[in-house]
Structure formats: structure tokens, C-alpha cells
Amino acid sequence: MKSSKKSDFDIKDIIAMIIAAFQLLLPPLFILFTIIIVLYFILKYFLKM
């Protein structure tokens, strides 16, 4: 048995986990981000008038 068990948990595994998390979190975050930008521009437009 290898004693270097931590080397099995590689950078690739971490990147894969991050990508999986992004795939789960991205749609709601993207919708939220779009809503915030739209609201920001609407408020900016109304404050200029």
C-alpha cells in the first residue's frame, strides 16, 4: 500500500469538484447576476431622468 494517499487526491480532482460545483451553482447565480445588472441599469436610467 502506498503511504502517499494524499497524492491520489490530485489537482485534477479538485478542479473536477470545482467544475461540478460551478455546474450546479452557475444557472441560479447567472440568473441572479442578470437580474442585479438589469435592476442596476434601470435604476441608473431612472435616476438620470
Image (cartoon, helix red, strand yellow):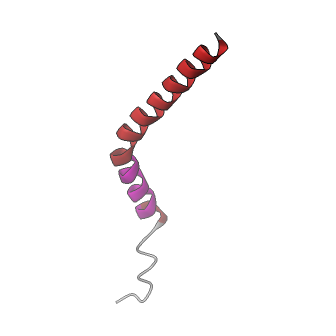
Farthest residue, direction top: 49
Residue at 41% over, 82% down: 5
Residue 25 position (above or below residue 30): below
Residue at 42% over, 89% down: 3
Residue 3 position (above or below residue 23): below
Exactly how many numbered labels are in the figure? 0
Q: Quadrant of the C terminus?
A: top right
Residue at 37% over, 46% down: 25
- Whether the magenta-drawn stretch holds residue 14 is answered as yes
- Tell me the quarter of the picture where residue 8 sits: bottom left
Q: Quadrant of the N terminus?
A: bottom left
- Tell me the quarter of the picture where residue 40 sits: top right
| Position of residue 31 measured from the top left corner of the image (x, y, whole percent) | 39, 33
Range drawn in magenta: 13-22
Residue 46 position (above or below residue 22): above
| Position of residue 7 measured from the top left corner of the image (x, y, whole percent) | 46, 76
For the stretch drawn in magenta, the main secondary structure is: helix
Residue 28 position (above or below residue 9): above
- Whether the magenta-drawn stretch holds residue 46 is answered as no
| Position of residue 6 measured from the top left corner of the image (x, y, whole percent) | 44, 79
- Tell me the quarter of the picture where residue 13 sits: bottom left
Task: Between residue 31 and residue 12, name the one nearer to us.
Answer: 31
| Position of residue 18 measured from the top left corner of the image (x, y, whole percent) | 43, 55
